[in-house]
Amino acid sequence: MTTVVHAIAGYFFMLLVLRVLARRPGSQMTPSDFVLVFLIGGVVLLATMENDRSETNAVLTVITVGICHRIVSHLKQRFPRVGALIDGTPLVLLKDGKWQTEAMGKAHVTDDDVMAAARSKGAKTLSQVKYAILERNGGISIIKNNG
Amino acid sequence: MPSADSESPTKPVEDSASRVDDDIAVGFDLAFQRRWWRFEFAVWTVFTTLVVLAMFGCFGRGHFAKARTAAHDGSLDVQYDRIERFGSPSVVTVTFGPRAIHGGKAQLWVSESLMNALGNQRVVPQPVEAILGDGGILYTFAATKPPATAEFALQPRAVGGANLQLRVPDSETVNARIFVMP
Amino acid sequence: MAPVLRAIFGYCFLILIVRIAGRRPGKQMTPFELVLIFFIGGCTLTAMVGDDRSLTNAVIQIVSIALTHLVIIWAKGRSAVFGRIVDGTPLVLMDHGKWHTETMNRMRIQGNDVIAMARDQGFAALDRIEYAILERNGEISIIPKSQE
């Protein structure tokens, strides 16, 4: 009983915390971002498992989290609004050579981050970049100018 | 002309994966995938059932797991978990009836399964005396008058069924069947 | 004996869970999904280790897991069917401008995921794409239309 309730609460708590934290590029996560991820996971983990180290408890917790995840992904699939709420929407950071400063400020993305993404796509200068888009997972997509 | 690596076996490169529209090589197999999706659905159905059962405590630590049994002569009332979990703490509460207390003390005999299968960690309050024998332990508590309650903190260390027997000397034996989940 | 069995059980249980929890684009994993993976692993870990926090136990369980992993890899190499069961098959999400809706719904992939992947590979819009394929590792491969 408590296990299942704790697992559900833990799942949605983590979802909320990581949603309101700044979106950081999944593939470009810095070590401190990783530490944070493990820290959050570990703390919630300890609270969920309490003093019950039985196999039953572990199986039930994992299954509960799995079911939560499945329900959430199902809702995302059915209702695009839910998807936007949970995953956010892509944000345009750079458009036709102009920084979209509001989006960049709110999303805590610096022009260095965009430059790094542009370099990884083989663009030498920003003038070669037509669009830079902050994806929902935190990655930055670069679309180059043709030619 | 034999080269240095002529010994190492080779195999011609060919697309072993099935093609879509004779165009692109992916090991795409919708029939297999449909079967898998059916399996996936079945697994999730079973899992959901398990979690719902767990919410009600069918696997311990919940409403259904709680049990209570009493001696007909009113000497003893035992609250325990009929389903325990391996290594996970729980409490058995024993309430003595008026018949159990005389001469300033209450006595309680408990079967050995309390120690070995159910892993008794401590008895609250501290018994005045513990005497071994008769396949169990006879605890003596200092007591005045009812209601009087003693608690055993358990941490089961054997998976499977366990039979816990409790009795006030010269009274009826109370039997508690306990199952320990892994 | 018990620690070994617990380790093997934990490994196989995790394989099953991760396999049926749905393939998510690996590179597109959100930090939340990363936390979730750690969380699920940690839950299993608690039961696997139990009260035995000795070095011996740790070594025994790590070796058990490594061996189970080797056995699975070996079995995947031996039997194509087993490989498909453990890893699944690649799935076509889109070809020639048509979404495969059944596959997308079942795999909980949204059009947006494919579009994001296309952008990531530098395509501005979907009409430049011939195929989108969900790979076994959850990556979405984008195959552009051949230049004519």
Image (cartoon, helix red, strand yellow):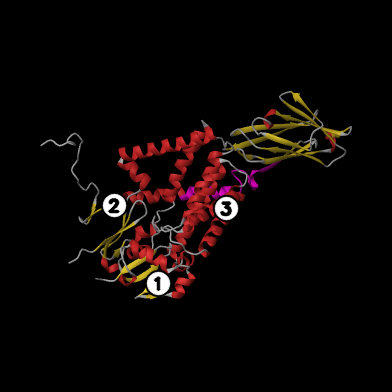
* Disc 2 + disc 3, Cβ < 8 Å: no
Q: Which mark is residue C55?
A: none
First to last magenta residue range: B44-68
- Helix, strand or loop at label 3? It is helix
Q: Residue at x 35, y 59 (%)?
A: C102
Which residue is outermost to the left?
B1
- Helix, strand or loop at label 2? It is loop
Quadrant, the C terminus of chain C: bottom left
According to the image, label 2 marks what residue? B28
Q: Amino acid at mark 3?
A: Val
Q: Is C96 left or right of A56, judged from the image as shown? A: left
Taking the magenta stretch, the answer to whether it contains residue B57 is yes
Main SS category, magenta section? helix
Select label 1 or label 3 by which is in front.
1
Select label 1 or label 2 by which is in front.
1
Q: Quadrant of residue C131?
A: bottom left
Marks 2 and 3 sit apart, C-alpha to C-alpha, by: 39 Å
Instruction: Return the x and y of residue A104 as percentages of the image width and height.
Output: 45, 71
Q: Quadrant of residue A52?
A: top right
According to the image, label 3 marks what residue? A44
Q: Amino acid at mark 2?
A: Phe
Taking the magenta stretch, the answer to whether it contains residue C134 is no
- Helix, strand or loop at label 1? It is strand
Q: Residue at x 57, y 44 (%)?
A: A57
Label 3 crowd bin: few (<14), some (14–19), many (20+), radius 10 Å: many
According to the image, label 1 marks what residue? A92
